[in-house]
Image (cartoon, helix red, strand yellow):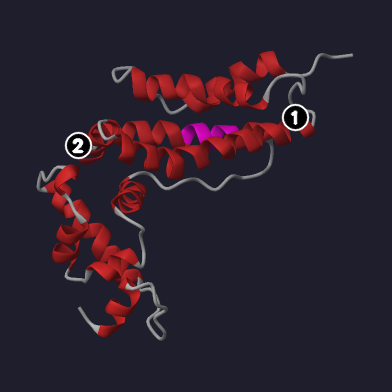
Amino acid sequence: MDLAEQGAGRGGAVRGRPRSESVERSIIEGVIGLLEDGVPLAEISIERVARTAGVGKATIYRRWSGREELFCDVMRTAEQADPELPGTSMRDDLIVLLESIRRRGLANRSSALVHNVFAQMKSSPKLWSAYHANVIEPRRRLTYEVVRRGQENGEIRSDVDVELIGDLFSGPMLVRTAMRPDAELPDHLAEEIVDTVLEGLRPAMS
């Protein structure tokens, strides 16, 4: 371990050593490589990742607080990237959000790596809790924000709870991707779900 890494390991600030994207990429790719080789998540320690990536442990800890945070970033890399919302209407934003869920569902079915890691994470309460807090919950809050803006703009009724509405939109897609692995996920599914739910949520005509 070099002096800079020793200082970081003690919590001291390291000057002149900016975070390197190539180093972060090599660390994440090192974890993915271990997973592809069939190494269980439980056996992937920070020490093992450091050896695989050819870095010191302090290099990893400068970027991630521990295994849980690192694995969350590994999953973000393996999954479809979160979409940018068009912002043209609540309907358009919701379709984009549901389409991203559909694509992740397809990836989970087609990628043995993603499917295997998800299964292992769910069997580890600590890992699953970290993934839920750092990845799933921000996505859910974004859906609620889109719904809230739709209420403020008069696109949907304002007398229904925001979280309930958000779940009404995302629920059908999540059921198909997570609970019904054999269910079809056609290209038009996101639009069909959004338009069907909107029919019951539009403000009554005066």
Do tag 2 and tag 1 residues touch (Cβ < 8 Å)? no
Say whether residue 123 is left or right of residue 151. Answer: left
Of the numbered discs 2 and 1, the one sitting upstream in the chain is: 2
* Stretch in magenta: 94-99
What is the total number of numbered labels drawn onto the structure image? 2
Q: Which mark is residue 85?
A: none
Q: Which residue is mark 1?
A: 151
Instruction: Give, as a three-letter code, the residue at label 2.
Output: Ala
Q: Residue at x 27, y 36 (%)?
A: 121
Q: Is any atom of residue 184 visible in this view? A: no
Examine the residues drawn in magenta and state their main secondary structure. Answer: helix
Residue 191, how many percent across, how many down? 54, 26
Q: Which residue is at a point 27% across and 35% down the rendered structure image?
A: 124
Q: Position of residue 147 (x, y in %)?
A: 66, 31
- Percent of width and height locating residue 143: 58, 35
**Which residue is labeled 2 in the image?**
112
| The quadrant where residue 57 appears | bottom left
> Circle 1 — which element?
helix
In what quadrant of the picture does the N terminus appear?
bottom left
Q: In the rendered image of this protein, does residue 118 appear above or below residue 78?
A: above
